[in-house]
């Protein structure tokens, strides 16, 4: 018991003397925990060598409807947006004046037809009398001339009647082709001439893409080159096609070469005269790419944080890299990385060179 008490006293004395007469070791800050980041591997991908240009879509069957006769619109059978077949009546121009002209000429034709019948009878009678020696040959020839004149007059009027009947059909404005009716500025009672635009009809099932390519790239143009048709803001792929025509001439005002391609529009999303982006793909090759979000730009230089192994732990190393154009959501890497390098794509703003990192989910 005495020994135990002595040991306890010694221990107490030692602790007291340490606390009062000696300083403790300096505190050391615990190592910073690794930063959770998301990683992506630099990889070889098929990259298009492509250039975007402004293109315009044109309907192969786009028609401006103009009347073939002057007059006043009496009926409108269609409205904007209607799909019509070829020959569908679109509008009526008041035909009453023309109908009156046709009726008058038809009456004249009936009279001249009666003249022909009478002249034929007179010729038959003259022929019989001449055979019997009752009249001179001159009278027979006169009867023949009268019939020929009557026939000629009847034929001429018949042609005029047919012409006027054809003209009467023009008072019904019909669709020259199938398609969709455009804007209809015409109104009932409107006086129109052959120069008046009544409406348009467009068939957008197949559209023609027109692209002007600068003369500097003209030598690379050829039929069959793929073309990606994009929305005007470049965010949506609308169609795929290929070049089917390369103009042999240069546009003197723009120093560009016109190329064309056919675009199927079965879903009706595209419109005639619509502006689009046309990406002409010159070639496709394998190249190293990393996500755009992995690239930092500092003072005009591009960098990426690469996760490297350091004694079994991951640390972020900041590497200068050289990048090419953006392809989709990726940068084309020209120098500074190799396939398989894991780059930080999320959380890089929290990092410094050599900082410990941990791959997150």
Image: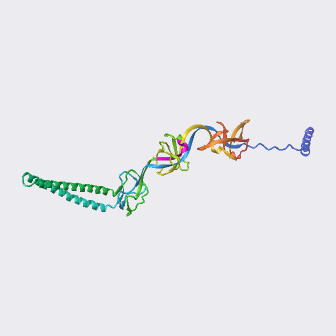
Q: State the predominant SS element of the stretch in magenta.
A: strand
- Identify which residue, 264 or 313, lies in the foreground: 264
Q: Quadrant of the N terminus?
A: top right
Where is residue 88 shown, x and y percent of the image? 36, 53
Left/right placement of residue 96 relative to residue 313 reads: left
Left/right placement of residue 257 relative to residue 292 reads: left
- Identify which residue, 295 or 214, lies in the foreground: 214
Where is residue 131 shown, x and y percent of the image? 8, 51
Magenta region includes residue 210: yes
Where is residue 170 shown, x and y percent of the image? 33, 56
Left/right placement of residue 32 relative to residue 325 reads: right
- Identify which residue, 360 or 77, lies in the foreground: 77
Q: Is residue 176 above or below residue 280?
A: below
Taking the view exactly as shown, the residue that stands out farthest to the bottom is: 189
Q: Which residues are magenta?
A: 208-218
Query: Residue at 69% of width from left, 40% of height from top?
Result: 306
């Amino acid at each position: 018991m005495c020994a135990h008490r002595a040991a306890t006293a010694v221990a107490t004395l030692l602790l007291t003397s340490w606390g009062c007469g000696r300083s403790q070791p300096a505190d050391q800050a615990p190592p910073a925990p690794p930063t959770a980041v998301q990683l992506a591997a630099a990889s070889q991908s098929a990259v298009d060598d492509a250039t975007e240009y402004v293109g315009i879509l044109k309907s192969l069957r786009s028609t401006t409807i103009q009347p073939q006769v002057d007059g006043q619109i009496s009926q409108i059978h269609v409205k904007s947006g209607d799909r019509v077949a070829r020959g569908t009546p679109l509008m009526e121009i008041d035909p009453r004046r023309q109908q009156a002209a046709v009726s008058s000429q038809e009456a004249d034709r009936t009279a001249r037809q009666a003249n022909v019948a009478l002249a034929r009878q007179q010729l038959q009678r003259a022929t019989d009398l001449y055979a019997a020696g009752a009249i001179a040959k001159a009278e027979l020839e006169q009867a023949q001339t009268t019939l020929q004149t009557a026939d000629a007059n009847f034929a001429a009027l018949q042609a005029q009647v047919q012409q006027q009947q054809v003209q009467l059909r023009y008072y019904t404005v019909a669709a020259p082709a199938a398609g969709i009716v455009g804007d209809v500025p015409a109104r009932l009672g409107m006086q129109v001439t052959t120069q008046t635009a009544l409406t348009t009809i467009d068939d957008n099932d197949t559209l023609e893409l027109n692209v002007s390519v600068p003369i500097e790239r003209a030598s690379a143009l050829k039929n069959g080159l793929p073309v990606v048709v994009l929305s005007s803001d470049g965010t949506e792929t609308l169609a795929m096609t290929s070049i089917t025509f390369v103009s042999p001439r240069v546009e003197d005002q723009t120093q560009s070469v016109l190329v064309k391609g056919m675009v199927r529009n079965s879903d009706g999303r595209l419109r005639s005269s619509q502006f689009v982006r046309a990406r002409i793909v010159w070639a496709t090759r394998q190249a190293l790419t990393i996500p755009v979000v992995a690239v930092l730009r500092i003072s005009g230089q591009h960098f990426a944080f690469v996760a490297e192994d350091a004694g079994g732990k991951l640390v972020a190393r900041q590497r200068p890299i050289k990048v090419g154009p953006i392809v989709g959501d990726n940068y084309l890497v020209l120098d500074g990385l190799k396939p398989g390098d894991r780059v930080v794509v999320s959380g890089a703003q929290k990092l410094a060179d050599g900082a410990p990192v941990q791959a997150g989910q």
